[in-house]
Amino acid sequence: MRVGVLALQGDFALHAELLQGLGVDVLMVRRPGDFEPCDALVVPGGESTVLHRLLRINDMLDPLVEFAANKPLMGTCAGCILMATSLEDAGGVEPMGLIDITVRRNGYGRQVDSFEAQLTPVVEGFNSEEGAPCGVFIRAPRITRTGQGVEIVACYQQEPVAVRAGSHFALTFHPEVARDARWHDWWLRTL
Ligand code: GLN
């Protein structure tokens, strides 16, 4: 399996490292033609307004939407924002509507309000043997609504922070910063 990592902005290198650790063939995606050879794609965290602008400038928005119509996407933080149906504080970002959720982009406040929390995945097949995963929330978005058919994968204080719809998987926190490959591993095993 060949997994692309969108490498325009944000912490794409950490995602690539984790995926390589899982024995996955990783391809950095920087141009429109880079999507084609990938079987799945990770959209990293960073800053969604910047990421969205870079996608547009590089003519990658439509190819990304086309890719996501047929292939699985995993998005963390800014990636999750781009995958939503609607945003409460869009700031110019037009989300792709891949998972029926409403997201508040800076839902927990500003950079100084970033935090870490232990999470409890509520899905089958997640490897919890090594203990509860740590969620690193950096100027994190908040999922304020989940539509029908959206499966909740993990919660923090009763709110969903990881959700799945079909083969698309979105997390509001950064598993790659916690160096925790179990989320990627779980997602890839469900495909
Ligand atoms: N809130 C940020 C945004 O709007 C996301 C922050 C992150 O990816 N760590 O993109």
Image: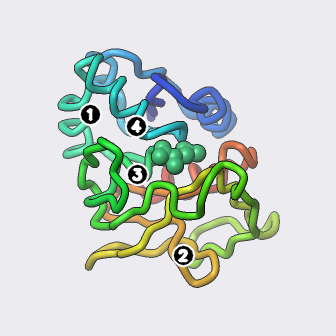
Q: What amino acid type is highlighted by mark number 1? A: Leu
Q: Between disc 4 and disc 2, whose residue precedes?
A: 4
Alpha carbons under labels 1 and 2: distance apart: 28 Å
Q: What amino acid type is highlighted by mark number 2? A: Val
Q: Secondary structure at mark 3?
A: helix
Query: Quick one: label 4, few (<14), some, or many (20+) residues within 10 Å?
Result: some
Q: Does the Cβ of the disc 4 residue fall within 8 Å of ligand 1?
A: yes
Residue at the spot of label 4: 49
- Quarter of the image for residue 156 reads bottom right
Alpha carbons under labels 4 and 2: distance apart: 31 Å
Horizontal side of residue 97 vs 102, given as left or right: left
Residue at the spot of label 3: 81
- The residue shown at (33%, 65%) is 165
Q: Nearer the viewer, residue 139 or 100?
A: 139
Alpha carbons under labels 3 and 2: distance apart: 22 Å
- The residue shown at (74%, 44%) is 179
Asked if labels 2 and 1 touch by Cβ distance under 8 angstroms, the answer is no
Alpha carbons under labels 3 and 1: distance apart: 14 Å
